[in-house]
Amino acid sequence: MKIATVGKGGSGKTTIAGTLARILAEDGIKVLAIDGDPNPNLALTLGISRADADRLKNIPPSLMAVKTEEDGTRRLYMTVTEEELMREYAMAAPGDIELIMMGHPPDGSAGSGCMCASHRAVRGLISEMSGYGEHTITDMEAGLEHLKRGTVAKVDTMLIVAEPYYRSLEAAGRTWSLANELNIPNICVVANKVRNAEDQAAIEEFCTKHDMPIVGVVPSEEQFVEAERRAQAPIDFAPSCAGTDAIRDIAQKLRHMKSVAA
């Protein structure tokens, strides 16, 4: 299953992505995690130390190139082998998880150019590396740019992480519309940072109105906040808290979704 987590900045999509990857890998299942956010934080959420995360090399967009086939169609391909890419750029996380990171501007500095090549490279990697593990989980950048550029067109499951307030829900609605235009097979909402019944009702009302299925409800979790303060993975800091249990329930639903599709 190729999963992408998307959402408005601050929605908690990286926490969902990292914790979900750790849970899916618990049964010895190989997972490839891709950090496609220009402000990468997935490593810490997976349980990689800050010092090790700082050593992780960013995959340059040049590792993906465009090839024109005999029939005139154009497709992306990797300019190195899968083995070379993983040896040079991947880092192991706890469990059977390998993390690769990309998404920076061309030279990593302000004013250094647009992200077009990086979006293209993420799209290509999602497609080319889909056979590496049983699951591929990509943490996308905040906002809608990756949808407008079709960066996530190759995923089969999109988790739209939404908080219980107007701007987040409106962003989730726009994301839903664009994801449907890309014909992504499974699109679900993760209701995140839910404090009470009123919060949950607000998200459910919005999603029902727009025919957006909710795959899970994750409470506002102080343990996750504390884990971030301590630069620890949420699942390591609080493996049995309500927030972790809620993401574990989402993982189970995704496993069932995969088995039904198979």
Image: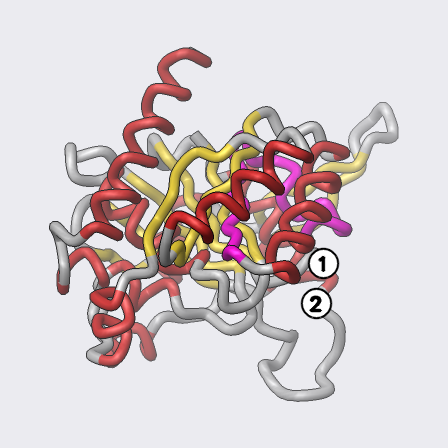
Mark 2 near mark 1, Cβ–Cβ under 8 Å? yes
69 lies above or below 118: above
Q: How is the image coloured?
A: secondary structure
Q: Which stretch is magenta?
A: 145-164
Q: Which residue is mark 1?
A: 145
Q: Quadrant of the N terminus?
A: top left
Q: Of residues 132 and 187, which is closer to you in this image?
A: 187
Q: Which part of the image, by quadrant, shows the C terminus?
A: top left
The nearer-to-camera label among 2 and 1 is 1
Q: Secondary structure at mark 1?
A: helix
In percent of width and height, residue 217 lies at: 38, 43
Q: Residue at x 57, y 62 (%)?
A: 141
Seen as rendered, the residue at the extreme right is 72
Q: Relative to 260, does residue 143 appear above or below in the rendering?
A: below
Within the magenta stretch, is there residue 196?
no
> Which of 130/77 is in front?
130
The residue carrying mark 2 is 115
Residues packed near mark 1 inside 10 Å, few (<14), some (14 to 19) or many (20 plus): some
Q: Secondary structure at mark 2?
A: loop
- Residue 155 painted magenta: yes
Q: Is residue 51 visible?
A: yes
